[in-house]
Image (tube, rainbow, N blue to C red):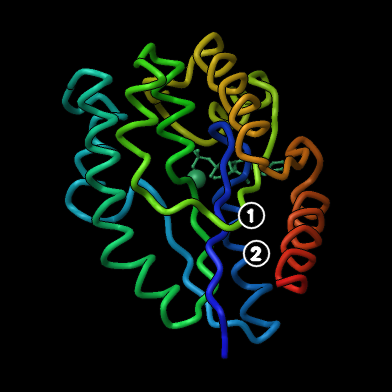
Amino acid sequence: MARGAFIVLEGLDGSGISTQATFLETHLRKEGYKTLLTKEPTTGLIGGMIRAALKEDWSTSFKSLQLLFCADRARHLEDEIEPALYKGRVVVCDRYMFSTLAYGFAAGVDAHWLFNVNREFRMPDLTIFIDISPDISLTRIESGREKREIFEKRESLNKVRRAYLNLAKRFKFKIVNGENGVDETSNEVRQIVDKFLSRR
Ligand SMILES: Nc1ncnc2c1ncn2[C@@H]1O[C@H](COP(=O)(O)OP(=O)(O)OP(=O)(O)O)[C@@H](O)[C@H]1O
Ligand SMILES: [Mg+2]
C-alpha cells in the first residue's frame, strides 16, 4: 500500500522555497507519486490575516502573530495535510513550524514558549533547509517586490538564519546550498528526496 510522506522546505525569504517546492512536486508527480503541494501561511482566512500583518496592513505583537501562524497550522494539518497523508500522498509543504520557531525566536519570542505551542504538531518526515546568506536574501527580495516585509532586514535575517542552523542540528534537517542556480539546487533537492523515498 502507498505510504504518505511529509516533506517540508524551509529557508530565508528569497531562498527559493516556493520555486523548489513547485519543481519537487512536479518531479514527484512525474515519478508516479500522488502529491499535495501546499504552503504556510495558508490561503485560508487565518493565512490571509498573517500575510496582511507581514505587509503591515495591520499590526499585532510578535507573540500574537506566532499564535496566528499556529492556529493556521492546526487547521492546515487537520483539513489538508493529515487527510492527504492518510491517502498515501507525498505532501510537499512550503514552510512549516520551523518558520515559526526561527522567525519567532529571531523576533525575540521565548524559545521554550514557541516549542511548547508547536509541540503537538506532527513532525515532518524530511525537512530540507535551503541555505542562502542574508545578503543574497535581500538582493532577491529587492528585485522581486515593491515593499519589504517586517522580517526582511539584514540583522533580522541574520538571526533567522542562525536560528535555522541551530534547528537544523537539533531536528536533523538536510541542508542544500541555495546560492547556486535554480537547476543545481533542484537537482540536490531531488536527490535527497529520491533517496529518502526509496529507503522507506
Ligand atoms: N537558486 C536561485 N538562483 C537565483 N535566483 C533564484 C534562485 N532560487 C530562487 N531565485 C529567485 O529568487 C526569487 C525568490 O524565489 P522564491 O519565491 O522561490 O523564494 P521563496 O524562498 O519562496 O521566497 P519567499 O519567502 O518570498 O516566499 C525569485 O525571483 C526566484 O526566481
Ligand atoms: Mg515563497
Whole-Å distance between the Cαs marked 1 and 2?
6 Å
- In the picture, residue 51 is in which quadrant? top left
Q: Tell me which residue sits at (81%, 58%) in the image.
A: 187
In the picture of the structure, the residue carrying the numbered disc 2 is 24
Assign the N terminus to one quadrant of the image.
bottom right
Question: For this rendering, which residue is in front, 51 or 160?
Answer: 160
- Residue 53 position in % (x across, y down): 24, 30
Tell me residue 26's x, y (percent).
62, 72
Residue 93 in the image, given as x and y percentages of width and height: 49, 56
Q: Give the x, y percent position of residue 148.
A: 42, 23
Residue kind at label 2, given as amino acid type: Leu
Residue 190 in the figure: left or right of residue 102: right
Ligand 1 falls in quadrant:
top right
Residue linked to disc 1: 20
Q: Amino acid at mark 1?
A: Gln
Classify 32 as above or below 90: below
| Circle 2: element type | helix
Residue placed at 32% from the left, 23% from the top? 113
Q: At 62% across and 44% down in the image, what residue appears?
A: 16
